[in-house]
Image: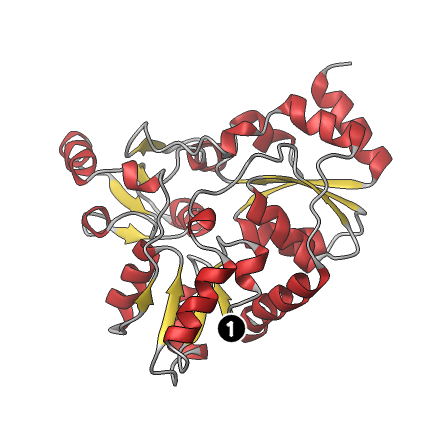
Amino acid sequence: MDIVERINKLKRTRNAVILAHNYQSPEVQDIADFVGDSLGLSIQAAGTDAKVIVFCGVRFMAETAKILSPAKTVLIPDRDAGCPMADMITAEDVKRLKRDHPKAKVLCYVNTTADVKAECDLSCTSANALAMVNGALKNDDEVIFVPDMHLADYVAGQTGREFIIWKGYCPSHVKILPENIQKLKAEYKDAIVLAHPECPRAVRELADKVLSTEAMCTYAAGSHNKVFIIASEIGILHKLKKENPDKDFIPASERAICPNMKKITLEKVLFSLEEMTFEVKIEQEAMFKARQCLRRMLEYRA
């Protein structure tokens, strides 16, 4: 019995669902029940009757799954798979910002820890950040936006709003440089450039569309264009190509790799199911407050 068969057998035995983020390695994406962005995956898992969630992603994503499915056991195959951006801000940092700006509402990117979410008023994703600012926060004069300064800068540019911005960033997306895009556009003259909003402004300004990972997949599927330059973590290319075999997807930079995402392997997924490790646990008060933060976003979207 090979490793994939063993994983599938254990998945049935444990009544587990396997989630893989779009940035996971191809072989991990291929054994997952659902592949997508972090919040979407957590929502999908919450809607299943599975008792166990194996989240192939980074820790804040597994925490989000636990927040939305508190009765389920949530496992992350590598306990050291963290998110540098999420780790750039702490709950104490948010408390300090709130003391300095007592009238401000705090909007946090979903790429934050449960402890940080617990201190925030509202959450957002890269896909709905504009809607959250234009809608749920339209009457708030002061908004603290944490932790990604590039997403905040993008939303500010699209809405004309000013934010109190935390200087966090994604180390993988900042490796994509404007000269990478310029060189590829000269080589692939008919290509459409799709950039993630975590990219710096100079990269976003060279893109035809600025989109979340799931929105990239939707756009590519519906486009008549056959060549795309993708300014995001390279893991997304596997899903794009799998869903659009007749189209070509060019990475904006081969250096745009998240080493933490790539810590998850098939062997670790198997071990996680065998030994029921590593379980994600969140302190009850923090989980309750973080759930309120996420629910405000989900209720507004609904």
Q: Residue at x 15, y 36 (%)?
A: 179
Left or right of residue 101: residue 136: right
**Identity, as a three-letter code, of the amino acid under mark 1:** Asp
From the image, which quarter does the C terminus lie in? bottom right
Residue 226: percent from left, percent from top:
32, 37
The answer to whether residue 132 is seen in the rendering is no
Q: Indicate the secondary structure of the residue bearing disc 1.
A: loop
Task: Report the front residue among 100 and 229.
Answer: 100
Q: Residue furthest top?
A: 1
Q: Residue at x 28, y 60 (%)?
A: 154
Left or right of residue 200: residue 296: right
From the image, which quarter does the N terminus lie in? top right
Q: Is residue 235 above or below residue 280?
A: above
Q: Residue at x 65, y 33 (%)?
A: 77
Q: Is residue 70 above or below residue 103?
A: above
Task: Report the front residue among 97 and 7.
Answer: 97
